[in-house]
Amino acid sequence: MYEAQRALASPVRNPRMATVIGRLLGAAFLICFGTGLYSHFLQEPLGWMRFATRPEFLYQVTQGTHIVAGIACLPLLLAKLYIVFPELFAFPPVRGLVHFLERASIALFVGASLVQITIGLLNTYQWYPWPFPFRQVHFALGWVLIGLLVIHIGVKLPVITRYWSKSAPNIGNGSGSSGDGMGSGDADHLVAAVSGNRAFNAEAVRLWGSTRPSGVTGRVLDYIDATPRVANGVSRRGFLTTVGVATTAVVGLTAGQTFTPLNAVNLFGPRKKGVGQQGVPVNRTSEQAQVADAALAPAWALTLVVAGTERAFTRAELLALPQTSVRLPIACVEGWSQMASWRGVRLRDLADLMDADPETSFRLISLEERGSFSKTQMGREYVRDPLTLVALELNGETLDLEHGYPARMIAPGRPGVLQTKWLSRIEAI
Ligand SMILES: Nc1nc2c(c(=O)[nH]1)N[C@H]1C(S)=C(S)[C@@H](COP(=O)(O)O)O[C@H]1N2
Ligand SMILES: [Mo]
């Protein structure tokens, strides 16, 4: 076992590096969790929840951040696994119940993280090669991961605090795993830890001083002395540079799908700004939604239903009402977003025409018959917002069929999935 660990030894495989990469990864996880919860509850609000409608690009920012931080997790997680990989060969593999639980929680943590990042990434490409509903599983796994992150930080707290700052690791004084009273299991563990890092070995010898203790600590030092002091190729600086470049590259070459200054280098993002009908990307097409016939039928009218009263508005009638122009983004949950100019009727004007109570929420129903977004709900804060439109025009032209002709919803600060295209009915609820 020591031989295996020795073969894997490297200057980057040390607790300081694990702490450095670990806290970046931890921060990315927390950002993903926070922005993910926000996105989730926008789509599935609990009854009492109300959301900010300003700034109108809020969701564009939170979801863009979610996707960018999620993508950054991939190289960071691989780097972290590279650093701690020799732990797989720790001997004995299990040193009692607590140690077993610690290792089991880490195994679960690594597995769940890999699944979470992978399904999230594939989702941004709208590829769902699995038999479960993405959002519910991604949401549940998010909670599992935060729980495991808390456990992981708790378990590793002594290491994290000791290696948090750049100063020399204080392995000699007052730490529970060295000095007198160490069991032989601890010695194995220390040998294992020490074997991971040549520079750390030298530090250990220095800190322990010239007096060579006998017993367990002496064994550790004998081991250190017997171990060749050659690094196996990867230097710390080289490793950090590689991780930095890889992370910057995957982030930088994707973020352009939502962050305009990087648009030119958006190589990995599945959607490009300005590419699509009327300069806006299309997520679900009229063909996929099977709405073309109903949407282009001359008999189309938008039906409003409030407190049992129904009223149908033809497109000509909608165009005859006061028109408002707004600039609002489509901000897809999958990370891309695009600002656009919309023109149409304020939803609150229609609600007033129907004498709707200002406290009512609405249900938006699309011509689309199947599909998870054919019916969506809109809270009162969006209904009453002056920027919320039943849009009839996009970027100065009649709304394209692909963008929801004859009429679509556009509201500030909402995920793309709730910007319902091909409207058919709007019901007060
Ligand atoms: N009826 C309906 N509306 C819909 C969808 C849909 O599948 N069906 N997709 C939504 C999603 S996921 C997004 S991101 C936006 C995209 O709008 P766009 O295609 O006009 O850019 O439309 C939304 N409106
Ligand atoms: Mo979307």
Image (spheres, rainbow, N blue to C red):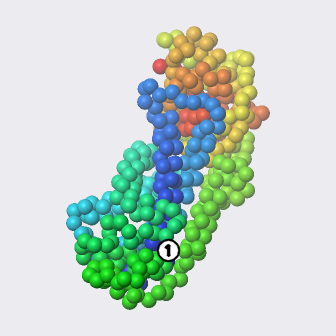
| Residue at (70% x, 54% y) in the render | 262
Query: The N terminus appears in which quarter of the rendering?
Result: bottom left
Q: Going by the image, does 242 lie left or right of 159?
A: right
How many residues crowd around disc 1 within 10 Å: few (fewer than 14), some, or many (20 or more)? many
Q: Is residue 266 above or below residue 405?
A: below
- The residue at the far left in this view is 96
Q: Between residue 182 and residue 418, name the one nearer to us.
A: 182
| Residue at (41% x, 80% y) in the render | 209
Q: Between residue 429 and residue 402, name the one nearer to us.
A: 429
Q: Between residue 55 and residue 348, name the one nearer to us.
A: 55
In the rendering, at what x and y percent does residue 118 appear? 47, 58
Q: Quadrant of residue 234?
A: bottom right
Q: Quadrant of residue 48?
A: top left
| Residue at (64% x, 44% y) in the render | 337
In the rendering, at what x and y percent does residue 314 appear? 65, 20
The amino acid sitting under disc 1 is Val
- Tag count in the figure? 1
In the rendering, at what x and y percent does residue 247 appear? 58, 62
Is any part of residue 137 visible from this angle? Answer: no
In the rendering, at what x and y percent does residue 71 appear? 55, 57
Is any part of residue 380 visible from this angle? Answer: yes
| Residue labelled with disc 1 | 12
- The residue at the far front in this view is 211
Q: Quadrant of residue 179?
A: bottom left
